[in-house]
Image (cartoon, grey):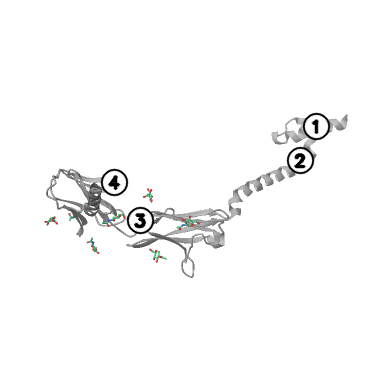
Amino acid sequence: MYSFALITVSAVFLLLGGRGADGSDPLIVTSHSNATGGDLLTCNLTDFALVISGHQWLKGAKVIHEDKDSSQITTHNITGVNAETSGQYTCKFLTSPEVYAVINITVAPHVVAYKKTEHGNEGDTGVLTCKSNSFPHVEEWMWSMVSADGNKPIVNGSEDRYYIKSTGNKTELRIHQLEIEKDQGEYICNGSNEHGNEGAIISLHVRSRLAALWPFLGIVAEVLILVTVIFIYEKRRKPDDVPEDEDGGSAPLKSNAGANHDTVRQRNSS
Ligand SMILES: *[C@@H]1O[C@H](CO)[C@@H](O)[C@H](O)[C@H]1NC(C)=O
Ligand SMILES: *[C@@H]1O[C@H](CO)[C@@H](O)[C@H](O)[C@H]1NC(C)=O
Ligand SMILES: *[C@@H]1O[C@H](CO)[C@@H](O)[C@H](O)[C@H]1NC(C)=O
Ligand SMILES: *[C@@H]1O[C@H](CO)[C@@H](O)[C@H](O)[C@H]1NC(C)=O
Ligand SMILES: *[C@@H]1O[C@H](CO)[C@@H](O)[C@H](O)[C@H]1NC(C)=O
Ligand SMILES: *[C@@H]1O[C@H](CO)[C@@H](O)[C@H](O)[C@H]1NC(C)=O
Ligand SMILES: CC(=O)N[C@H]1CO[C@H](CO)[C@@H](O)[C@@H]1O
């Protein structure tokens, strides 16, 4: 009973005196300031009892700086806050055990279209995709279609044709049963988080089913014309067939026809 209470008390102490939500050590005071030419991230270890054998800075899971200094303060300089530098920076003091703190460098979403122009065939499904790789991730994605009377928001599942699938760094709009007049045009994907929003435009081109058939129809037409020309040519040549066959100098193309005439003639004479 008594030991159970002790365990409970120490667990509460661990929770109170332990790490922050992202594992940051409360003994480290962090700061982020912008000087001219770059932003400065600072970590200050306020516990002087720990022996420091060096520092590490990580961006996400990747080590971006290492040193063997024993100072209580370590800094990292980034070239301004933007989509590329945004992320979770960790300063780690190489003590025993190691202590660290996390500094979030946050920006509004940086939204880009996977492809600025997409193509789809009439009746098929069109797929439009946007991404954002900045930190923190996008909280809400919105799609709309550009039209003369303002942008029309697209509701997921509406008309049983529009389907939206979103994650923190990607959104996908699928349009089933594409129609040229209705669906061809420009679409906007908007990503937002607590720092703001950004949109990207994608053009959707819808090809008619007939257009997809044109090359095939072309070949069919070519073959038909060729066959007709040969047919007419053969018909016109018929009267001259007899003398030419006797020469034996018939072209390969008409050799078959010639052979047929020969058998016909042979049958007739016998
Ligand atoms: C950095 O400077 C900009 C203005 O240049 C300011 O709006 C922003 O709040 C500053 N950020 C920090 C973390 O000091
Ligand atoms: C950060 O780095 C930039 C360029 O590398 C430099 O101009 C600037 O002075 C540095 N800022 C600090 C506070 O060290
Ligand atoms: C670091 O923390 C110590 C203890 O709280 C404080 O005395 C010192 O001024 C801090 N240094 C900086 C650069 O903030
Ligand atoms: C940093 O971002 C992470 C993930 O979004 C979050 O869990 C954590 O609370 C943030 N830390 C601070 C100090 O804002
Ligand atoms: C859209 O609806 C489908 C189900 O019809 C669902 O699976 C999907 O998560 C929804 N997308 C969003 C962004 O809410
Ligand atoms: C996007 O987020 C998912 C999890 O939400 C992750 O698995 C994936 O690696 C991320 N992709 C990029 C390019 O960041
Ligand atoms: C509906 C909506 O939020 N639209 C926004 C999408 O993004 C563009 C550009 O970033 C804004 O101008 C729109 O207001």
Q: In the image shown, does 169 or 149 lie closer to the viewer?
A: 169
- Where is residue 69 shown, x and y percent of the image? 14, 45
| Residue furthest bottom as drawn | 149
Residue at image mark 2: 237
- Sequence-wise, the earlier of marks 2 and 1 is 2
Mark 2 vs mark 4: in front: 4
Secondary-structure class at tag 1: helix
Residue at x-position 74% and y-position 34% = 256
Q: Which mark is residue 61?
A: 4
On screen, residue 145 versus residue 134, left or right, reads right
Which image quadrant for residue 257? Answer: top right
* N-terminal-most mark, 4 or 1: 4
- Above or below 255: residue 180: below
Q: Quadrant location of the C terminus? A: top right
Give the answer, above or below, for where 146 lies relative to 227.
below
Amino acid identity at mark 4 = Ala
* Disc nearest the viewer among 4 and 1: 4
Marks 4 and 1, how far apart at CA: 87 Å
Crowding at dot 2, Cα within 10 Å, few <14 / some 14-19 / many 20+, comes out as few
User: In the rendered image, is residue 244 in sight?
Assistant: no
Residue 64 in view (yes/no): yes
| Disc 3 element | loop
Residue identified by numbered label 3: 137
Which amino acid, mark 1?
A: Asp
> How far is mark 3 from mark 1, CA to CA?
84 Å
